[in-house]
Image (cartoon, helix red, strand yellow):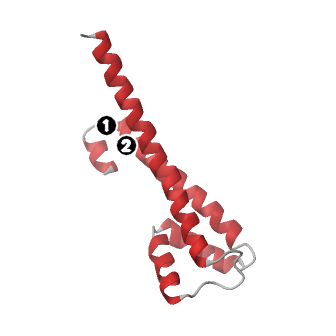
Amino acid sequence: MISTYYKSELYRQANFFLGMIITSIVITLAHNFVQYSKCGKRVIIREFILTLLFLRPVVDAYRISTNKSPKMINIDIIIEMVVNKGIELATEGTSIIIRRAHEEACRASEAFEHP
């Protein structure tokens, strides 16, 4: 979707979505670091790679279905999935709502200026 915006020369929208994705990844990585800090560097690196490859939802679903989770984590695997989904919703959903409201406000101001 971002490449489509760049091809259509909608750089502002493309940069907005890119920023939204980067924000989501950074917050998820911070959560992973805190969550797996007691597990060692190898586990932290593995979780970082899973997040950077956008495999977090798949891994969460697998861990819940098999009831397997890394040892020494601070919270239950279901709660971890809910936190990950909450991060996605907060960073991506809220950003889209704000962008949509801004677009509507711009349209309304243009309609007011040019009746």
Q: Amino acid at mark 2?
A: Ala
Q: Amino acid at mark 1?
A: Leu
Residue 32 horizontal/vertical position (percent) = 63, 68
42 left or right of 19 in image: right
- Residue furthest to the right in view is 38
Q: How many marks?
A: 2
47 left or right of 57 in image: right
Question: For residue 10, which numbered disc appears in the image?
Answer: 1
Q: Residue at x 55, y 65 (%)?
A: 84
Residue 36 horizontal/vertical position (percent) = 68, 74
15 left or right of 33 in image: left
In this rendered view, identify the residue nearer to me: 60 or 7: 60
In this rendered view, identify the residue nearer to me: 74 or 37: 74
Q: Which residue is mark 2?
A: 14
Determine crowd level at label 2: few under 14, some 14-19, many 20+ residues with C-alpha closer than 10 A. some
| Quarter of the view holding residue 97 | top left
Circles 1, 2 touching at the beta carbon (< 8 Å) = yes
Quadrant showing the C terminus: top left
Q: Residue at x 46, y 71 (%)?
A: 57
Determine crowd level at label 1: few under 14, some 14-19, many 20+ residues with C-alpha closer than 10 A. few
Residue 17 horizontal/vertical position (percent) = 41, 46
